[in-house]
Structures are given as structure tokens and as C-alpha cells.
Image (cartoon, helix red, strand yellow):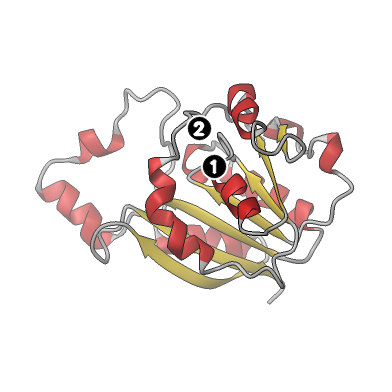
Amino acid sequence: MTDYKDYGFYNDEPAHTFQYLQAPLLSMLDKNTNRCILDIGCGNGYLANYLISQGYNVYGTDASEAGIAIARQANPDKFFVQDLSTGKLPPELQGLNFDTIISTEVIEHLYDPAGFIEFCKSVLNGKGGIIITTPYHGYLKNLTLSLFNKWDRHLSPGWQGGHIKFWSRATLGKLLTDAGFKVVAFKGCGRAPYFWKSMIIKAQIGQ
């Protein structure tokens, strides 16, 4: 699996992206069923630390040492540097039974998204679920970008480490179902319906 680096949110301020994802993402969680959560690509730990403050049991990993250093300021024992190319969790997390994986605005940066989903499945050990957020692409949004000649700005090819995969509800859903998950929830987030900034897909193993 190809490594990824520096795609999270590493400033001291809360991530702008999470502000419009917060309510719909939280609506997909329940403390009674989501008892041990792993936030992969946690950046500066804003989301994971927020969930911890709400009573959830959450751990976070990221390839950025700078991001993890910020995350640890609030909860030193909950965050760890992880190189996804190893296909393994950090040693400190390998004995935990995770039932939920969250990954916000990461999969659009990965060369091998199928490998990433298989890694998530292995972490869940055959049971549990995954919640993924990524920028939304669909017919009306794509058509509008074309009509107003906004694709160059939208794709931003000069952005170092930027987006290399552009997901629709159908393509991300297929990626998950091909890996043995069943999609159980979808939400569009930000802007007007079908012009959403991002989407959230929740899927369960073996349902």
C-alpha cells in the first residue's frame, strides 16, 4: 500500500472541514455500539479529541509526526504515528479490538484506496463498521463545474499532496461493497443538495 503523508489538519485551530461534517458524522455514532474507535488519518487530532470529550473511546493515527504531536497535547496516550505502507497498526494499538474506523478526507489522497479499505477490514477483524468522508462528486456538481469552466480551479493540480481520486456515491460505495462491506448510510454535507462539498458513507462488514 502506498504511503500517505501530511494530508490531515495540523494547525492549532479546529479544522474548517470538520465544522460542516461534525453534526452529520456524529449522527452516525452511538456510544453503545461504537465502543472502540480508530481515527485513521487523524491529522492534529481535532475530531478524535472532540469525540473523546463527548465520552467516546477513540484512538488516532497519522503519518505526520507534527500532527500527532499536536493531538497528544490533549490526550497523550491516544495518538500514534502510523505508516500505512507497512500494513500494520502501531504496536501500541495491535491488542485493541476496534469496532469502528473513521477516516475523514483521506481516501481522495491515496494511490491504493482498495488496499486502504482492506487494511481497515483487517483492523476490524471481520466485524464492525467504517465511516468515510471525502469530497463529493456527482452529475449535477460535475456538470456545473464544466459549464462554468471551473475544473482547473477545482482539481488544483499544483497542490502538492492534493486530491488524486474523485469519488461519487456510486464509486465509493462499490469500493466498499467489493471489499465485503454493506453501505448502511449516506449523507451529503455542505452547500445545497447534490452540490455538496463532501459526503459521508457508513458501511458495515457482513450485513
Q: Is residue 60 above or below residue 196?
A: above
Residue at 62 percent across and 32 percent down: it is 2
Of residues 74 and 44, the one nearer the viewer is 74
Q: Is residue 31 visible?
A: yes
> Dot 2, crowdedness within 10 Å: few (<14), some or many (≥20)?
many
Q: Is residue 174 left or right of residue 127?
A: left
Residue position for label 1: 46
- The answer to which image quadrant residue 90 occupies is top right
Q: Which image quarter: residue 54?
A: bottom right
Measure the C-alpha gap from mark 1 to mark 2. 14 Å
Quadrant of image for the C terminus? bottom right
Closer to viewer: mark 1 or mark 2: 1
Residue under numbered circle 2: 7
Q: Residue furthest bottom?
A: 207
Q: Amino acid at mark 1?
A: Tyr
Q: Is residue 163 above or below residue 35?
A: above
